Structure formats: C-alpha cells, structure tokens
Amino acid sequence: MEPKREPSSVDLAALVGELGAYEGAKLDKAYLYGDDLVRLKLRDYDRGRVELLCEVGDVKRVHAAAPEHVPDAPGRPPDFAMMLRNRLSGADLVDVSQYEFDRIVEFTFERDDGTTSIVVELFGDGNIAVLDEDRRVLDCLDTVRLKSRTVAPGSTYEFPESRVNPLAVDYDTFAALMDESDTDLVRTLATQLNLGGLWGEELCSRAGVEKAMPIEDAGDAEYERLFDALDRLSAALQSADLDPRVYREDDRVVDVAPVRLEERERAGLDAEPHETFNDALDAYFHELEREAEEPGEDRPDFEAEIAKRKRIIDQQEGAIQDFEAQAEAERERAELLYAHYDLVDEILSTIRAAREDDVPWDDIAARFEEGQDRGIPEAEAVVDVNGEQGTVTVAIDDERIELEADTGVEKNADRLYQEAKRIEEKKQGALEAVEDTREELKELKRQREEWEAREAEGGPDDDAEEDGEDEARRPDEEWLSMTSIPVRSDEKWYERFRWFHTSDGFLVIGGRDADDNEEIVKKYLDRGDRFFHTQAEGGPATVLKASGPSEAAPEHPDIPEGSKEEAARFAVSYSSVWKDGKFAGDVYEVAYDQVSKTPESGEFLDKGGFAIRGDRTYYDDTAVGVAVGITCEPETRVIGGPPETIEDRAVTTVRVEPGRFAQADVGKRIYREFRERFADTSFVRKVASPDRIQHFLPPGGSRIVDDE
C-alpha cells in the first residue's frame, strides 16, 4: 500500500479543533525550508514552546511538531520568511479554521498594527498565502493565475469554488445528492458527497451496506444507515471524541486517521493508538520523512509519482465538474424561460406597462399578490418583486429565476446563457492544468515501461496497459433512436480555441480574437507545424499541428494535401470573408519558422499580428463551409469545422453558409433541429446547448443550408 502523503478533509476537520487549543500563543519566529515548508515557532502560556509545521510540496501536512522532530534552522532567511517575521513577530494566534470542507487551513494572527492571515492550501500543487486585514495577498509561495481564481501578491485572495460539506447536510439533502448519482454507493459517497474513496468505503463498512450496490437498487434503509454513520462521524469530530491511529503495513507507516478505520483494520494493518490526532500526525509524518531518507534501490519510485499525478488529476477534474454543473444550471434556467415563453412574457410585459405609467414598484407587487389570490397563473409564478434592483423573480418547475424586468424573454435568456459561458470560461485554466498533469502522467508511465523493459532485458512489459479492442461503430440511426445516451467526454487543452481534426487525424487550431492569435503563434506554433491565414485581414491564426504536445515532430513532416486543404477551408470560413457575406477567399500556407512576432525595421505589429517571411503556398478561391455535428463515440460532444471531415465523424450534422441570421439565433435553431433528431432530448441539452453550438459558428451572419 502506498503511504498517505496528504491529509483528507475529514482529517483537517478533526485537526483544527485540536489546534484551536493553541489560540493565544505568540509567534516568535518564522522559517522557510526550501520552497514548500514553513515553520512557525510560537510561545504558549500553558504549553511553552509550540512548533507549527506547514508543508505543501509532494508531502502536504499541517500540525504541531515535537521539538525533536523540527528541522534545524536554515541559514539566512529568505524574503518570504523575513516578511512573516516583520508581520507576525509578537502577534497572537487568534483563530484556526478550515474553509468549509476543503483542504484549506487558515491561521489568523493579531497585533496592535493589524491582522494577518496565513492560508495553507493542501490540495493540488499546494500553496501558502499571507493576507492582510483586507484579504489582499502580501506574498505567497506560488503565484496562481487561473481564470477561476488568482493568488498573487497584490490580488484579493479568493477561495476555490466551494463543494458539498457532507458533515453539515441534513438527511433530505443527503438523499437528494445520492439520488443524483448514476453509479454505485461508494462512488456516490466519494464524489457527490465529497468524501473521497477511503471515507466512502469506511462509511459503507460502518453502515453495513454493500459498497458496490448500484444507486438505483439502494432504498431508504441503505440511505438511513449511511446517513446515520455519517452523522455519528460528524458528531465525533465536532465533540473531539476521537480515537487517533497510525496504521502500519510490514512495519512501515501507511496511514493516519483521527478515528479507528474499519477498512484499515479489516485489511490487516497494525493500528498504533495516540492520545491526540495532532500527535498521531506528527509521529506519522516524522516517520514517513525518516523512511524516505533511508537508502533504497536505485529504481525511481514511479508508483508514488504516478499515484500523486492521479490524485492531482482527480482534484482538477472535480473543479472542472463543478464549473460544468454551474454552467448547466444556468442553461437549464434559460431553457425554462423559452419553454414557458408566453407566461414569462406576460409577466415582463405587465411590469413594463405599469412602469411606463409610473406605477410604483410596491403597487406592482401588490397587484401580483391580488392576482395570486384570484388564481391567475402569471401572478402565481411571481415570488418576488425587487424595485431597487428592477428585477422580478419567478418560479418555474420549482426553479427560481431572477429576471431583469425592463427587458424581454430573449434578453433574459441570453443573459443566462452568457453567464453559463462565463462560468465555462473559468474552467479553462483547470482544463489546461489537467492536460499538463496528464502529460506528466503519460511521461512517467513511459519512463516506468522503459525501466522495466531494461530490467527484463527486452522482455514483455507485464504492467503495460493493454489497449481495449476496437468496438464496431454503432450505426448513426441507432444513436438517434436511443432513449438514453451516456455522456462521455474528456476535454482537451485546445478546446479553448477554434479547432477540428482533419480527415487524416491532424489537429487544427485557430484563434477567436487577437489574444488567441497572439497565444497560438507564441505558444503553440512548433517545429513541423504549418501556418495558414487568409490573404484578407481579419482571420484566425490557423495552425495545422504536425504532432501532439508531448511528441517531437520532424522538420518536414509528411502531411497529406487533403489535410492542408481542409485547414485552408477552416481558415477562410472563420475569417472576415464569411463575415462579409462572401463564399470564397484566398488562403496562404507557410512553414512554422516563416512566422515571426518581430516586425521589419520601421514597422509595427498590433496584438495578434505577425510577420511572414519567405515564399507562400496559395489556395486561391477556397470555398467557405462549416458543419456542426454531435459525436456519440468515443466521446459525446459538439464538433464543428469543414463539412467533409465533420460529417464523417458526427452522428448527425447541420451545414451553415453565410447568411443574414445572427450567430446566436443560428445556434438556437441548430439546437432545436438536433433536439428533433435525437430521441434522447436531454442528451442534446447536456452536450449541445445553443452556446456550445455557437462556439463552432463563424463570426457574422449565417443561415442553415437548405433552410427555407
């Protein structure tokens, strides 16, 4: 068993209660070891010397350590440690808290000249941030700049998006969360309830239920036993009724927990009790550190590094799922408005007419209350009228939706779609991060395979993952008639740009705006790639990738002419040529090293601009053309691009050409068309909402081909 290298949310819930006993202690000095271990030396009136260790590297931990377990003071303190000493010397520790049910611990110190907080993030790559009384970041070990949040000196600190706190839910909420799942009990507890795999299994053991039981087979009896086990765990943590244990396997520490774990003892692990959970943590991590320092075999610990990357991916994917759920909720609200168009339009029209006659907001609210007494459906749907904000809140299908009263149904729905789009944009940073981590994981597995191959002197690699046999492609008509299609997706780094795969499987990416063009040329134009652009200004910087992000491409890769022609069509279709209502334009192609961000002497390049040097290959009168479709295998998603490649990959497609209809309107019409084609309309809503379709439509006006 791989040893535990970071605390769980349950661990921290138990720990902060014990660390709260040190409130009132004064800080003497702060130390920084390397770039991931902070030591806070305090003096407590009752306990004397207190050493707090906060580590956020490969090993993550927070606990008070015995003096003999504290590393010797380093040499000259770095700037981060000096900043801590200047801010905190003589300050009182006034609070220790866990942020909701996340793996974040915050220490708050007070001194006559102000309040300082130290936030220790024990998830992902780990971080420690120091905040002033206004929650502004004074300094941090790592600068984080994601679309979802920023942790950098000078920025206002923001916690990550909060997730479910299983220790605070009531039974009805617990049951509702369980019902939302489509897997088994243990996975539901791990994901829907945010408990993780170990505690999901532990609760099943304590409740006496089969962890592999499918959720649809579980009933009130199983739910009640599981909730009772969860409630007892929560009560034990809140009352500090703990039974801390360090668990060993083959005389090596592998786990530490604030309470006895049936799962660990059932597995035959030796349990070592401790008086406090903090003492157990200190003993565990000290021994783990000592074991790591013992000389071992020369073989790298691939398993530990692979397990670490997998944990990081799980955390990153959890954040992505949260963003997706929030965006999906906004889209569902928008669609409810269209589904009850007449009712919502009547409510908004009534308010606008009243305001045009200078009717006070309180009187408008009173009129709706009168209508409710008379059983008028439109009035019964109104649950709140807010004159200060100029909004009205309606209840449709048990969903409350706040509307701007001075606009119509369409603009309110568009506002919700835009909010969904904004939320989805926040996950882009997480998508990039998870893609990087996957590449690291792939490289580690490759290195492990090479090492084992050398050990076996060229023999077969028994641990190598076997590729599954290719299944026969399901007929498109069968997908369209299915009443329930499972959603399967694995979002890629390039999906933030315009993209498609050519008929030969080459990836093509293009910018949506000047910022994208700038990033593509600077970051993603690599050796062997081909660059395409329209002769006319106002087009995407289009790159046909010769290799994947972790592959080395040859200087002159063999790219079929058909793929180049498709890339040229992509470049012209998403350019100003389409926006101008034209059906063809000229495109040129150059090698990657002919594109430069350095202008000629005396010239200037705008953002997103670039200089081309050398000969060009032209594709004259390249026809525009875009198709948008839905794929069902191996992944379920919207795709778009040149019709000849999209129609070969998608179950069903819709072609568009330059026309007079706005991009958003065409996206909605295609969405309605897809809903008519699929028997599983909920599947279309999940994977091909209007805003996702719009993602693949060219800028400017369009029309559906053969749309009268």
Image (tube, rainbow, N blue to C red):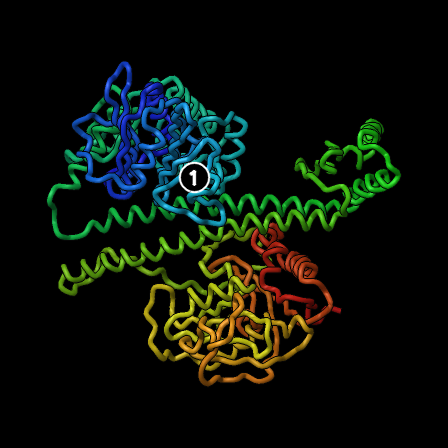
Q: Quadrant of residue 626?
A: bottom right
Nearer to me, 106 or 272: 106
Q: Residue furthest right?
A: 357
Residue 44, position as x, y percentages in the image: 28, 18
Q: Which secondary structure, mark 1? A: strand
Instruction: Estimate how packed mark 1 is, as few (under 14), some (14 to 19) or many (20 or more) residues with alpha carbons within 10 Å.
Output: many
- In the picture, measured across the screen, residue 413 lies left or right of residue 168, that is right
The x, y position of residue 432, in whole percent, is: 43, 55
- Which image quadrant: the N terminus? top left
Residue located 26% across and 29% down the image: 281
Please say if 612 is above or below 468.
Answer: below
Quadrant (top left, top right, bottom left, bottom right) of the C terminus: bottom right
Tell me if 53 is positioned left or right of 635 in this view. Answer: left
Q: Which residue is mark 1?
A: 137
Name the one closer to the observer, 342 or 35.
35
Rendered image quadrant of residue 5: top left
User: Which residue is rendered at x = 44% and y = 58% of the image?
Assistant: 493
Measured from the top left, where is residue 438 in percent x and y?
36, 55
Is residue 578 among what the camera can see?
Answer: yes
| Residue found 43% across the figure and 31% down from its top | 99
Instruction: Tell me which corner region of the image, top left, top right, bottom left or bottom right, holds residue 521.
Output: bottom left
